[in-house]
Image: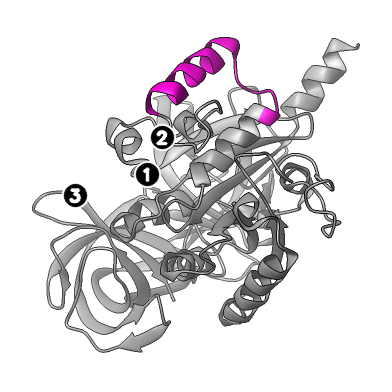
Amino acid sequence: MDIGKFLDKHENKTLLRFITCGSVDDGKSTLIGRLLYDSKLIFEDQLSVLKKDSKKIGTVRDQGKIDYALLLDGLKAEREQGITIDVAYRYFSTPERKFIIADTPGHEQYTRNMATGASTASLAVLLIDARRGILTQTKRHSFIASLLGIKHIVVAVNKMDLVDYSQEIFEEIKGEFAKFAENFQFETIEYFPLSALDGANVVNPTPELTPWYDGKGLLNYLENIDVSQQLQNQDFRYPVQYVIRPNLDFRGFAGSVVSGTVNVGDEVRVLPSNKKSKVKEIVTYDGNLAEAFAPLAVTLTLEDEIDISSGDLIVKDNEKNPQKGSDIIANVIWMVETPLETNKNYLIRHNGKIIKGKVAKLNFKTNVNTLENSATESLQLNEIGSVEFSLFTDIFYDSYPENHETGNFIIIDPLSNNTVGVGLII
């Protein structure tokens, strides 16, 4: 084997970030544990501990079997109750791709945790218990996935072993979800009949159990689906994080390209000053580049001396301008027990800059179970609504569907300095 080629292939594998979500006890943690186990990605010492824990505190029906959920549910309270409370992240790699999984909670009271896990994901694996069908939390998590811009959905109908691998039940759930999903703008929806406990259709197809299913195994599908968002094809956006001045001869602006591409020699404009210049160098630790694209972290130097500070935005002069304004409307996910109220002042962190502002108007809150909007005076913990903000300073932004990075912000309580919500600009 050519070690150089092997290492190069491994280094250049694509990365898929995805979440598992759904209602309580649908088998989210068990599915991920089974993926890791069947892919032979569990070390011997981990497997030994897992077998011991399965005998002692496992929840599987057959006490001789491994409880794969224990690989993910590490908190004491999770193991005692057999549920997921916090978001558990796991990294693994196959010969085809690298993966980062976020195992998110199913309980309604942990909706904010689910939203946190979904915020960086490109795909959602939505689990449905074959015995119970589509439930309230199934709809809630579908809505949140759509709200956060996830375009690719895998509907994993789990626990098929408990309904004798019934094709009729699978097709019924598939049809019901397809009808519900018409409310959203998912690009792809794929359906899998699974038994995470027995490994049916998890890594490889199991025609002996589901002879009526002629699709791929779940892992094979995850290895091959194209979830690229074509960030490089969007307009160039570069929020400045730090100004680097190690000596009198160097002044650079460090940050990440959140969308688009930039080349040495490109004419750029700095907001809010509107000063123009050209890119002189694209500097990285490993040497200078001729071109940088999303999501690379780089340092830019410009040909002209321009006053640039942390929180400024660098864009290309010949591309579409971001919007500018101090009155914005956003979908807000509220994350604390103290409710969001109108006329209350908050701090808004957007593109690395913190701005003071207040809630000018609460348009409505959305019932994520029925998707109906209703008038409200406040947003409570885990509720989602449309909110108008009046900021004390203009910001430069894109709508969230156009650009996730410049279209989102976090809401901070000015007294406690705690993050209390997240906003997705409409």
Confirm whether the magenta stretch covers residue 141. Answer: no
Specify the segment rendered in magenta: 38-57
Tell me how the rendering is colored.
one colour
Most prominent secondary structure in the magenta stretch? helix
The residue beneath circle 2 is 73
Please, which residue is most extreme toward the left here?
415
Residue 186 has which mark? Answer: none
The residue beneath circle 3 is 418
Q: Position of residue 336 (x, y in %)?
A: 20, 58
Mark 1 or mark 2, earlier in chain: 2
Q: Secondary structure at mark 3?
A: loop
Mark 3 or mark 2, earlier in chain: 2
Q: Secondary structure at mark 1?
A: loop
Can residue 108 be seen in this snapshot? yes
Instruction: Identify the amino acid type marked 3.
Output: Asn
Residue at the image position 86 percent from the left and 19 percent from the top: 5
Residue at the image position 40 percent from the left and 76 percent from the top: 369
* Disc 1: CA contacts within 10 A as few (<14), some (14-19) or many (>=20): many
The residue beneath circle 1 is 83
Kindly indicate whether the residue at mark 2 contacts the one at mark 1 (C-beta within 8 angstroms): yes
Can residue 186 be seen in this snapshot? no
Q: Position of residue 161 (x, y in %)?
A: 64, 50
